[in-house]
Image (cartoon, rainbow, N blue to C red):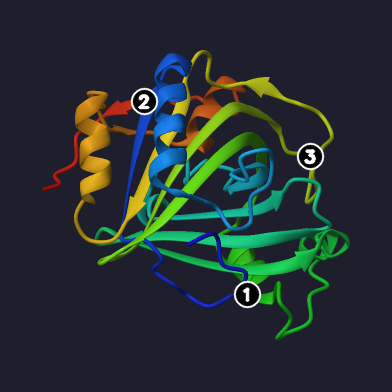
Amino acid sequence: MSPSTDSRENREFATEIKFLISPAVAEPIRDWARVQLAPDPNASGEARDGYQITSLYFDTEQFDVFHRRGSFGRSKYRIRRYGQSEVAFLERKLKTRGLLTKRRSIVQLTEMERLSNGKIEQGGEGYWFHRRLRARSLSPVCEISYRRTARVAMTQYGSIRLTLDENVRALPATGFWFSDQDGALILKDQIILEMKFRFELPALFKHLVGEFALIPQSFSKYRQSATVLGLQCPSDSVVLENRIPEYA
């Protein structure tokens, strides 16, 4: 139920729904989740459900990922680090026909520079990622970090997951490595609530949505960060999009 460390294609969750909520709403939801759901097995902290995430996001010179042009609107490439770990995860997140597929491989931080100079041996853990970056002309654009609270549960339809992401910060990327700077705050007085599940919205999440009158929104940390940092000119784009998905 927590992020996998293998490199196989998998569909852990068929659907994900996001909400932007205030800290005042986030606190009772966090309390609710700590009663109703179990802590993420890989998390830490006093409640055993928190960790820091830092990710490098990739785009083309024309910002095709940002503008969701063609196939760039369905896939997202990033390198993710948890806390101060000495390893990172190379990830491709792909959405097709409502299904979420993720591929990820684990590499040592010291190996990340090989991605930039192409010194990756065929068959190595990072080879597939390097090939995809070159084929799609992708390079590091920005680094995004935030604190996550994660709770999970198993239902008759499979695993479900609730996360709360706060203190979301971003700064321009300078290469295939992680910075020690904090970055600019990209969301003021807002926390990202996300629900992941298979098939239809679970009864637990239905109850939560109704109790707090939550309204789903389409939101991208990357697009918001690129806009706040002024990395491109999104004249024909809307970063925050109100959208209520269909669910039973």
* Residue 232 in view here: no
The image quadrant that residue 50 belongs to is: top right
Above or below — where is 211 with respect to 129?
above
Whether tag 3 and tag 2 are in contact, CB under 8 A, the answer is no
Task: Please name whichever residue, 23 or 121, is drawn nearer the observer in this view of the structure.
Answer: 23
Q: Residue at x 26, y 66 (%)?
A: 157
Residue kind at label 2, given as amino acid type: Leu
* Extreme-bottom residue of the structure: 123
Task: Please name whichever residue, 108 or 29, is drawn nearer the observer in this view of the structure.
Answer: 29
The image quadrant that residue 74 belongs to is: bottom left
Q: In the figure, is residue 135 to the left or right of 121? A: left
**Circle 3 crowding by C-alpha within 10 Å: few under 14, some 14–19, many from 20:** some
Above or below — where is 48 with respect to 237?
below
Task: Please name whichever residue, 56 or 2, is drawn nearer the observer in this view of the structure.
Answer: 2
* Residue 20 in view here: yes
Q: What is the number of the mark on residue 240?
A: 2
Q: What is the number of the mark on residue 128?
A: 1
Q: What is the number of the mark on residue 174?
A: 3
Report x, y in % for residue 18. 35, 37
First in sequence, mark 3 or 2: give its number: 3
Task: Please name whichever residue, 179 or 114, is drawn nearer the observer in this view of the structure.
Answer: 179
Report x, y in % for residue 238. 35, 26
Report x, y in % for residue 123. 70, 86
